[in-house]
Amino acid sequence: MTTNNAVEVFHLNSGAKCQLRNIRNDLIPSYYLLCFPEELGEPSDQDVTEMLTLGVRHAQQIAFEKLGDREAFSVLYSGYRLAVKRVGMYILSCSAIDGERHGSIQFSQAKIYYKLSDLGKTMPQNSKLTTDGWKHLMAQFDLPELFETHTILTSAYCEKHRRYHTLDHINACFGHLDSVEMLANYPHEIELALWFHDAVYEIFSGSNEEDSAELAKTFLIRNEVCAQSVERVYNLIALTKGHAAPETIDAKLMLDIDLSILGAEAGVYAQFEKDVREEYNRVPSFIFRTKRKEILRSFLERPRIYHTSYFFDRLETQAKGNLFRAIEAL
């Protein structure tokens, strides 16, 4: 192995060379990409296996050096066919070391399960999901582009166990935000909160919202964003756990946007219920039906589902109809 600044070169048994690149990342202290030069063609299965083995060994070494624990790492591997092709390199896998533990957050949500090079083909070019949209958002916080954080977030929403809590959900949220930005005090904070609000989504965890809020807080603090903004973004995300009564207009908009799916057209809502069931496919049917009814009824028992006039006028009646039908179908 030879080393060149932040790039380490490994010689594979096939005679090919792969690179382990240390890149800047604002969520994960030590973040690495394993790369295979494009001019050599597609790596063989043997090359991929060998690279993955090298990545694990490298991750164990760094974890031991930084934390004294060889197992304090995550290898974020998707296999070659779902890897990213960029800058003349085939990006095969990432190894990430959680050098600073934050509560229960292990950053394991940043798995590269999605062919990121295809993102632009599946969403509108003016979407807040694009790199241009992210760049604009960072500028509103007076921050540099920080595209690696954008990559990590988009990757998180493409995890295999997700069906509803995906990029489609975030894209839909941004569409609603576009319609009500003029009502918000800090629309850029709502936008960032939406980006992070489901970033951590483990099916049987009871702290997804808190962990997602903590992830956003860590990101903002590391980039020296003012304390008031950090607190507001954190609170916007944390509120989505129980959808408690919000006090500010931004909090009301955040919750209404997050719950906008309840007021969707009947067919769209029916697919939402199917997607939620798939996410919880390991839960026995009788338990799922009981718990799901409790959740849906809790929304109907509220004086109103939506807090702002904009969403109430447009979605309240449809949402109640969707909820009634969903309960009857369980």
Image: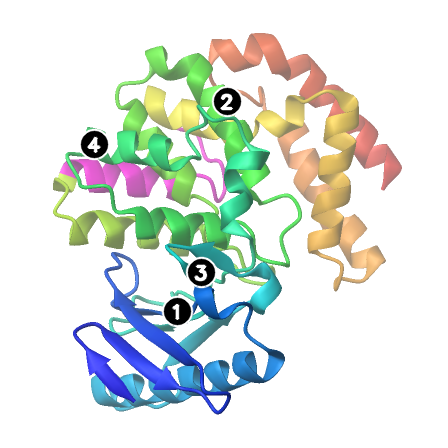
Stretch in magenta: 228-247
Foreground pick, 305 / 215: 215
Please give the residue where the numbered disc 1 appears in the rendered image.
106
Q: Is residue 317 above or below residue 218?
A: above
Helix, strand or loop at label 1? It is loop
What's the CA distance linking mark 2 and mark 3?
Answer: 24 Å
Q: Which is closer to the viewer, label 3 or label 1?
A: 3
Question: Helix, strand, or loop for circle 3?
Answer: loop
Q: Amino acid at mark 1?
A: Gln
According to the image, label 4 marks what residue?
Answer: 139
Residue 156 visible from this viewpoint: yes
Which residue is at a point 69% across and 13% down the rendered structure image? 317
Q: Position of residue 201 (x, y in %)?
A: 52, 55
- Front label number (4 vs 2): 4
**Front-most of residues 110 and 14:** 14
Q: Estimate the x, y position of residue 296 in percent, counting from the top left.
A: 69, 36
Mark 4–mark 1 Cα distance, whole angstroms, equals 28 Å
Q: Disc 4 vs disc 2: Cβ atoms closer than 8 Å?
A: no
Q: Is residue 23 above or below residue 251?
A: below
- Which amino acid type is marked by label 3? Ala
Q: Is residue 184 above or below residue 123?
A: above
For residue 175, the mark is 2
3D distance between C-alphas at marks 4 and 2: 20 Å
Residue labelled with disc 3: 110
Residue 86 or residue 179, whichever sits in front: 86
- Neighbour tally class for label 3: few under 14, some 14-19, many 20 plus, Cα within 10 Å: many
Specify the quadrant of the image occupied by residue 189. top left
Residue type at tag 2: Gly
Q: Quadrant of residue 218?
A: bottom left
- Residue 19, position in %: x, y? 35, 75
**Horizontal and vertical percent for residue 134?**
33, 36
Q: Residues within 10 Å of mark 1 (few under 14, many from 20)?
A: many
